[in-house]
C-alpha cells in the first residue's frame, strides 16, 4: 500500500513527466516540418538537429553537477524549464542563420536537459523507497501521445509556428507546477534524493565514470544512437515527403507512443526472460528491421505501421540503459551519472547521426541513406552481443 505522501510524490513526478514529454512531442514531431516550411533544406535541418544534440555533450554534465550540488532539486528543474520556455518563444522570430542557431541551441540545451535530470530525481526516489519507476515514466508516454493529438489538430488550424509556441507554454506550466508541488509538500525531501554535502570526491567520480561496464554502455549507446537518430531525426520530414498530412503524421506519433507505453508496462516482465544486455541487443537489431520496413512501405498505412517498432527500439533501450546507470552510481552521484550518459545518448551520438543523415539524404536520397543506417544497426547489435559474451567468459565487466 502506498502512503499518502508517496501518492502525492508519484502524482507530482507523473505530472512533470507528462508535461515534459508533451512539450517535447509537439516540438520534435512538427518542429522540423516548420523549418521545412520556412524554406530550409534537409541539410540545414540536419544541422539544426545536430545543434539540438550537440549542446547536450557539455551542457548535460554541467547541469548534472549543478543538480548534484544543489539542496533544492526542484529549483534546478524549475529554472531549466523556464529558460527552455523563454528561448522557445524566441525561435520563430529568428530569420538569420546565426541568430537561429544561437537561440535554438539555448532552447535545445534546456529542453533536452529536463529528461536526464528528471530521471535522476525520480529513479533515486523510486530506488530508496522501493517504488516502480515504470508507473511514473509511463506518464511521459501519455504526454507524448497527447502531444500528437494536440499538435496535429492545433497546427493544422493555427499554423506550424505553434510547434514552438505550444512547447514554450507547456514548459512555463512545468515551472509553475514544480513550485506548486514543492509548496504543497508533494516532492521528495533533499534527504530522499541523495543530496551531497559541500563537495564531491573527485577520485570517486573518476572511478565511477571510468569503470568498464559504464564505459562499455556509453560506447554502445554512442554507436546505436548514431544509427537510430539518422532516420529518426528526419522521420516527420520523411512522412511529409511521402505525402502524409500533419494529422496523419500525428497518428503515426500516436502509434509510436502506444508502442512505448506497451514496452514500459511489460518492461519488468521482459527481464524474466532475457538479461538486460540481451534486451539492449534486441532493441538495436530491431531498429535495423524498422528502417528497412520503412523504406519498403508502399502505402500510408504501411508507413504508419512501422511506428509499432518505436517502443522496442527507443524505449526499451532507454529504460534498460538508465536503470543500469542508476545501479552503477550511488545516490549522491545520480545526477552526474544520468547526465554523463545523457551527453552521449542525447548528445554526441545524435549529433553525428543528425549531421550524417542530412548530408546523406541530400546526396543519396532517403532509401539508400536509411538502408545504410539499417546495416549499421545490425552491425552494432552484433558487436554488442560479441562484447557481452566476451566479458561473460572473462568473468569481469568492471
Image (cartoon, grey):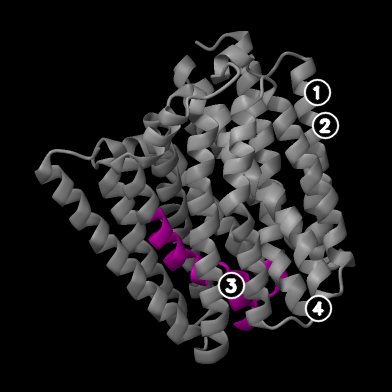
User: Is residue 312 left or right of 47 when viewed as pictured?
Assistant: left
Q: Are marks 2 and 4 in contact (CB under 8 Å)?
A: no
- SS category of the residue bearing label 4: loop
Q: Going 51% across and 83% down the picture, which residue do you hit? A: 360
Disc 2 and disc 3: Cα gap in Å? Answer: 33 Å
Mark sitting earlier along the chain (4/1) = 4
Segment colored magenta: 221-248
Is residue 297 in view from this perspective?
no
Check residue 234 in the rendering and tell me which mark sits there, or answer none. 3
Q: Where does label 2 land, which residue?
A: 176
Q: Are marks 1 and 3 in contact (CB under 8 Å)?
A: no
Label 2 crowd (10 A; few <14 / some 14-19 / many >=20)? some
Disc 4 and disc 1: Cα gap in Å? Answer: 38 Å
Please tell me which residue lies in front, 251 or 116. 116
Please tell me which residue lies in front, 357 or 289. 357
Q: Going 63% across and 48% down the picture, which residue do you hit? A: 59
- SS category of the residue bearing label 3: loop
Check residue 38 in the rendering and tell me which mark sits there, or answer none. 4
Disc 4 and disc 3: Cα gap in Å? Answer: 16 Å
- SS category of the residue bearing label 2: helix
Relative vertical location of residue 290 with respect to residue 272 in this rendering, above or below: below
Disc 2 and disc 1: Cα gap in Å? Answer: 6 Å
| Horizontal and vertical percent position of residue 375 | 33, 74
Q: Where does label 1 land, which residue?
A: 180
Mark sitting earlier along the chain (2/3) = 2
Amino acid at each position: 500500500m502506498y502512503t499518502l505522501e508517496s501518492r502525492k510524490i508519484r502524482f507530482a513526478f507523473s505530472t512533470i513527466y507528462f508535461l515534459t514529454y508533451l512539450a517535447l512531442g509537439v516540438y520534435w514531431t512538427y518542429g522540423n516540418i516548420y523549418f521545412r516550411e520556412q524554406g530550409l533544406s534537409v541539410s540545414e535541418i540536419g544541422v539544426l538537429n545536430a545543434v539540438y544534440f550537440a549542446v547536450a555533450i557539455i551542457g548535460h554534465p554541467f547541469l548534472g553537477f549543478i543538480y548534484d550540488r544543489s539542496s533544492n532539486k526542484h529549483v534546478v528543474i524549475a529554472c531549466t524549464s523556464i529558460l527552455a520556455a523563454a528561448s522557445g518563444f524566441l525561435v520563430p522570430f529568428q530569420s538569420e542563420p546565426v541568430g537561429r542557431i544561437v537561440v535554438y541551441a539555448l532552447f535545445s540545451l534546456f529542453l533536452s536537459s529536463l529528461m536526464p535530470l528528471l530521471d535522476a530525481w525520480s529513479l533515486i526516489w523510486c530506488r530508496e523507497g522501493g517504488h516502480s519507476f515504470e508507473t511514473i515514466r509511463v506518464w511521459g508516454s501519455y504526454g507524448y501521445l497527447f502531444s500528437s493529438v494536440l499538435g496535429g489538430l492545433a497546427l493544422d488550424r493555427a499554423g506550424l509556428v505553434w510547434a514552438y509556441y505550444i512547447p514554450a507554454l507547456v514548459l512555463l506550466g512545468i515551472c509553475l507546477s514544480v513550485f506548486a508541488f514543492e509548496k504543497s509538500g508533494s516532492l521528495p525531501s533533499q534527504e530522499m534524493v541523495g543530496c551531497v554535502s559541500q563537495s564531491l570526491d573527485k577520485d570517486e567520480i573518476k572511478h565511477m565514470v571510468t569503470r568498464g561496464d559504464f564505459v562499455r554502455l556509453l560506447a554502445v549507446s554512442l554507436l546505436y544512437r548514431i544509427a537510430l537518430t539518422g532516420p529518426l531525426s528526419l522521420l516527420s520530414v520523411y512522412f511529409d515527403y511521402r505525402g502524409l498530412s500533419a494529422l496523419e503524421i500525428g497518428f503515426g506519433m500516436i502509434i509510436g507512443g502506444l508502442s512505448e507505453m506497451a514496452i514500459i508496462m511489460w518492461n519488468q516482465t521482459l527481464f524474466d526472460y532475457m538479461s538486460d544486455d540481451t534486451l539492449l541487443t534486441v532493441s538495436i537489431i530491431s531498429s535495423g528491421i524498422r528502417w528497412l520496413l520503412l523504406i519498403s512501405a508502399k502505402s500510408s498505412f504501411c508507413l504508419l505501421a512501422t511506428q509499432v517498432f518505436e517502443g522496442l527500439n527507443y524505449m526499451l533501450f532507454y529504460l534498460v540503459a538508465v536503470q543500469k546507470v542508476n545501479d552503477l552510481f550511488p545516490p549522491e552521484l545520480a545526477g552526474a551519472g544520468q547526465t554523463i550518459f545523457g551527453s552521449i545518448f542525447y548528445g554526441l551520438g545524435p549529433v553525428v547521426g543528425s549531421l550524417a543523415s542530412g548530408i546523406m539524404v541530400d546526396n543519396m536520397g532517403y532509401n539508400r541513406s536509411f538502408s545504410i543506417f539499417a546495416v549499421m544497426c545490425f552491425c552494432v547489435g552484433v558487436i554488442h552481443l560479441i562484447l557481452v559474451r566476451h566479458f561473460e567468459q572473462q568473468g569481469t565487466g568492471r
